[in-house]
Image (spheres, grey):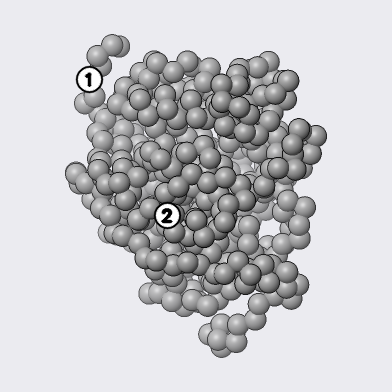
Amino acid sequence: MKGLKLPKFKVIPSEDSKLNNLSLVRLQGEPYENGYNMGQEFRDEVHRLYKTLFSRSPLSFVNGRPFLHAPIGRKVKTKEFEEAFEIIKEHIPDEYMDEMNGLAKGSGVPLEQVHMAHILPTITEHYQAKMECFEDADKIFPTTCSVIGAVGNATEKGHVYTVRILDWLRALNLHERPVVLCYEPQENDKNVSMGFSWPGFCGFVTGVNDKGISFGEQGWRNTPDQESLDGMPFTFLARDMLTKTSTQDEAVDFFRDAYRTCSYVYLIASGREQKAQILLTTASSGHEGFQVFDTGDTISDGYYGGDMTFRGIPGCVYSGMFDEVIYQRLTDWYGDLNLESLMRIAVDAASNDAVQTVITKLPRTKSESVDIWVSNAKYTGLFGNDGRRYKSGRTDYAYINLDEILNGAKRIRNVGTFYYEGMPTEEKQELMRAPDRYLNPKFDEKIN
């Protein structure tokens, strides 16, 4: 395969430092070919990412036990990891195994490391529940992502919007070389799917397909009896769902019937159906450990040992680290939620360790296309940094229209950003402490 040409692989660059040189990659080949081409094209970036990943991730091991931020050079190939992969790989579809094989061959990264990188999100979520027994656990600042879906009367002109904020270990430097992966299968029964990722990682943490279905994820209740490695990693589960489903019900059923691993919140939305729902899932398959919440529902449960309530808002579903902060901002802009207001809400909802924000406007008809705006972190951050560094540390937003990409667009557009310092820390803390929460008379008037 040496010297393989790239006829079914096209890179659309931004060549813009204000976007962290974000690139969009169109992949139209067979799985092995897609992986090989990715490895060849981004060889240096893949090696750089994996070196950082293994030196700073929670899968660095100390005395055979997972340890966060182990020293650079710490080996991660251990008996524990090998055993975990042997369990997980039984649920990874053959096409993704082939793609990882191609990625290893094309990049020159050992296949064991490629496997580890692709189950890393599952392993870290699984082991978080046991952090109390690990060395220096008190130094670990727990973060979670945030997801928002808004439809109908909640939004400007009734558009369907989603927001996904990825809060996860900014010290891994994932944001330094982001890519958007656009998979275009040749089979008629498979959808075009787009995921927001990094060179050397072919799973999806956030994604959308050409049928106007979107996906976002958030870590949830980390308890040992609701976690398992005997299932498909959510990063492949999400990509598989977007490839194979075309309606909201199909997407929800896909997650319900899958062999799941850890506890996650999934946001699923459909533009054509004007729907957004949150799924609370745990390890298992079927209805057990599977709850569905519609727009307007209140979601109440414990997060990281706390007691959080996501109060119902008509036309909205949401979840994240700052329940009352998100509630206040959504009700402040209720009825006028649009791109700019959601960009501002994303700043307030993010943790200090936020890596990426993706906002989508989903098509309501077949003649419309998916609109996407994506921004990545600008600086490397560590747990506990002053939030102001994040507020001023976002890249500009890149704008992507899926139809334009499929019709041969040659450049990703920078649509800029705005300066917004965000809600003062003291105000955030006051909202989070208030047991009876923020009241907004104007919001009450709008819905009554």
Q: CA distance from mark 1 to mark 2?
A: 36 Å
Give the residue type that dot 2 points to.
Answer: Arg
- Residue at the spot 24% in from the left edge and 24% down from the top edge: 6
**Would you say 306 lies left or right of 168 here?**
right
Q: Which mark is residue 5?
A: 1
Q: Secondary structure at mark 1?
A: loop
Residue at numbered disc 2: 394
Residue 308, image x and y in percent?
A: 72, 62
**Would you say 143 lies left or right of 406 here?**
right
Quadrant in the rendering for residue 26: top left
Q: Is residue 157 above or below residue 215?
A: below
Which class describes the residues within 10 Å of circle 1: few (<14), some (14-19), or many (20+)? few
- Residue at the spot 70% in from the left edge and 23% down from the top edge: 62
Q: Is residue 233 above or below residue 319?
A: above
Give the residue type that dot 1 points to.
Answer: Lys
Which class describes the residues within 10 Å of circle 2: few (<14), some (14-19), or many (20+)? many
Quadrant in the rendering for residue 229: top right
Q: Is residue 305 above or below residue 225?
A: below
Residue 84 can be seen, yes or no:
no
Q: Which mark is residue 433?
A: none
- Residue at the spot 61% in from the left edge and 47% down from the top edge: 383
Residue 185, image x and y in percent?
A: 33, 34
Residue 198, image x and y in percent?
A: 42, 36
